[in-house]
Image (cartoon, rainbow, N blue to C red):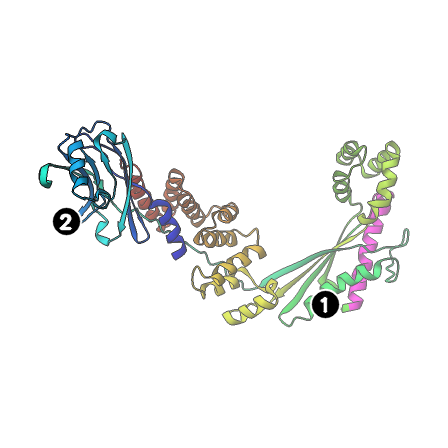
């Protein structure tokens, strides 16, 4: 939270406008004050074009800060008539030491001066009045006249420090996960028997075994089901491909059952006789000469056999290319292995699993660890980043990641997460916070009003902050 406070202060604490008026012969423009670290900076534009100084007089312009009995005098600017200037210099006066804001002979004075000075900041300066005093001196430093112009009241800039609302995901009674993959099992022409040593089958079958073994060997994991879906390529009649897709899927099911002795009901099968979607994706990404025409045929209402025959007859060169380079990959079996994982409640155990196998954790378990961390700490922010990487489409994960990003002033990342955080009242409020931090107050006001109407109490604080900021922003 401290980092955010400093950043926001730097944005709104600079150059607080004050009311500009003017005194005899001098106009003051754009007076401003800013609390910068341990200093109070004062700037203004002094218009001296109409200032006339009698040859026997000296005019001293001195800015001061006043608040009750407290005051501080800032470096003065001196403008000297001809005789008074020579009098001081002949008598050894170091005008530069006296008037550290600058000293000028009246005949050589500039039309305008950009005045800038600073002094050590003191708490009483919040609410102090900035004035400009004009003092006219005659012979022997006699004060002949004195005027004061009130330039304005300094108020410390309002700093908006939002309260972030982190949402706890729903606790899981059962944690269900799934691993998806594809295996490209080769079968001899028109056969549905798996030969493990045939062509690349050894490697493809090993992929499935490795996936199953990675789950079965974990004591905290239980496999609940395996789903298989077989596909054939379009080069044979559709009815024949239907039999191949069914038979080859059943062959893989039996292979897995014999290897692991799963119950028959735990393996589900499905099939698609011809993978036209896979063919379309390949053609769409290709540089085939008649790519558009082939895509149109794939998307047409022709029956599958008529489509395949038309492509083969009309575009024989492209068809041969597809037969050699695309069709083999269309003969595949997709699989999904679903499993449940033990629910963790101990924070230290969750930390251990996070280091070893983070994929076993649920969103709620990651949140439990985050709640044990110091808000804004590196571990706190890392956990929400991990959660959104593991569950990139989850609205709660994105909302919490957006809050963590805004808390560390990473507004670019926050905008990305907020776009995927849904439309819950908490998400609407978080978008209002984002608009505040990017100084879009109209948008923030509308969002805070919606969030408040939906029962978010923190939104009222945001609306109050907007009112204060606008009061300062439009104070001229």
Q: Which residues are magenta?
A: 232-259
Compared to residue 210, the image places residue 391 above or below, namely: above
Which residue is painted at 65% across and 63% down in the image? 339
Compared to residue 107, the image places residue 371 above or below, namely: below
281 or 11, nearer to the observer: 11
Percent across and percent down for residue 25 are 19, 29
Circle 1 — which element? helix
Residue 59 can be seen, yes or no: no
**Quarter holding residue 43:** top left
Which residue matches tag 2?
Answer: 68
| 428 horizontally vs 151: left or right | right
Magenta segment includes 240: yes
Percent across and percent down for residue 239 are 85, 45
Dot 2 and dot 1 residues touching (CB under 8 Å)? no
Look at the image and tell me in which quarter the C terminus lies: top left
Circle 2 — which element? loop
Query: How far apart are labels 2 and 1 at the CA level?
Result: 80 Å
Percent across and percent down for residue 216 are 69, 69
Percent across and percent down for residue 359 are 61, 62
**Quarter holding residue 443:** top left
Specify few, some or many for label 2: CA neighbours under 10 Å numbering under 14, 14-19, or 20 or more: few
Which numbered mark, 2 or 1, is in the foreground of this view?
2
Which residue is painted at 48% across and 61% down in the image? 378
Ranked by sequence position, the earlier of labels 2 and 1 is: 2
Which residue is painted at 45% across and 51% down in the image? 409
Which residue is painted at 80% across and 54% down in the image? 184
Which residue matches tag 1?
Answer: 213
Residue 97 can be seen, yes or no: yes
Magenta segment includes 429: no
Q: What residue occupies the far top of the structure in this picture?
A: 50
**How many numbered dots are placed on residues in this image?**
2
């Amino acid at each position: 939270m401290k980092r955010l406070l400093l950043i926001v202060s730097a944005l709104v604490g600079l150059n607080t406008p004050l009311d500009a008026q003017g005194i005899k012969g001098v106009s003051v423009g754009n007076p401003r004050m800013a609390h910068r670290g341990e200093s109070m900076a004062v700037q203004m534009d002094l218009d001296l074009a109409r200032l006339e100084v009698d040859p026997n007089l000296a005019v001293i312009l001195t800015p001061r800060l006043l608040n009750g009995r407290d005051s501080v005098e800032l470096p003065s600017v001196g403008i000297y008539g001809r005789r008074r200037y020579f009098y001081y210099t002949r008598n050894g006066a170091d005008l530069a030491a006296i008037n550290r804001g600058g000293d000028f002979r009246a005949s050589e004075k500039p039309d305008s001066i950009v005045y800038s000075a600073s002094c050590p900041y003191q708490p009483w300066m919040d609410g102090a009045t900035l004035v400009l005093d004009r003092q006219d001196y005659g012979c022997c430093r006699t004060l002949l006249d004195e005027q004061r112009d009130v330039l304005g009241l300094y108020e410390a800039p309002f700093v908006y420090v939002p309260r972030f609302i982190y949402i706890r995901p729903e606790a899981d009674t059962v944690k269900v996960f799934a691993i998806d993959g594809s295996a490209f099992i080769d079968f001899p022409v028109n056969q549905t028997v798996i030969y493990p040593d045939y062509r690349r089958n050894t490697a493809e079958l090993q992929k499935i075994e490795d996936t199953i073994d990675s789950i079965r060997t974990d004591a905290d994991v239980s496999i609940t089901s395996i789903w298989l879906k077989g596909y054939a390529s379009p080069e044979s009649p559709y009815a024949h491909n239907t039999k191949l897709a069914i038979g080859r899927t059943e062959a893989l099911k039996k292979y897995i059952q014999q290897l692991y002795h799963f119950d028959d009901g735990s393996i589900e099968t499905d099939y698609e006789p011809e993978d036209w979607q896979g063919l379309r994706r390949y053609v769409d990404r290709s540089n085939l000469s008649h790519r558009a025409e082939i895509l149109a045929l794939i998307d047409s209402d022709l029956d599958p056999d008529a489509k395949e025959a038309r492509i083969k007859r009309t575009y024989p060169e492209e068809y041969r290319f597809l037969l050699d380079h695309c069709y083999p990959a269309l003969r595949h079996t997709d699989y999904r292995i679903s499993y449940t994982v033990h629910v963790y409640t101990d924070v230290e155990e969750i930390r251990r699993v996070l280091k070893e196998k983070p994929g076993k954790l649920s969103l709620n378990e990651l949140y439990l660890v985050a709640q044990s961390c110091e808000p804004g700490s590196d571990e706190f922010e890392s956990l929400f980043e991990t959660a959104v990487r593991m569950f990139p489409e989850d609205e709660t994960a994105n909302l919490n990641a957006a809050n963590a990003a805004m808390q560390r002033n990473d507004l670019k990342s926050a905008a990305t997460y907020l776009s995927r955080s849904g439309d819950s009242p908490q998400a609407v409020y978080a978008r209002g916070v984002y608009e505040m931090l990017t100084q879009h107050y109209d948008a923030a006001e509308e969002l805070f009003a919606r969030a408040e109407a939906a029962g978010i109490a923190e939104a009222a604080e945001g609306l109050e902050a907007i009112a204060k900021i606008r009061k300062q922003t439009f104070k001229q």
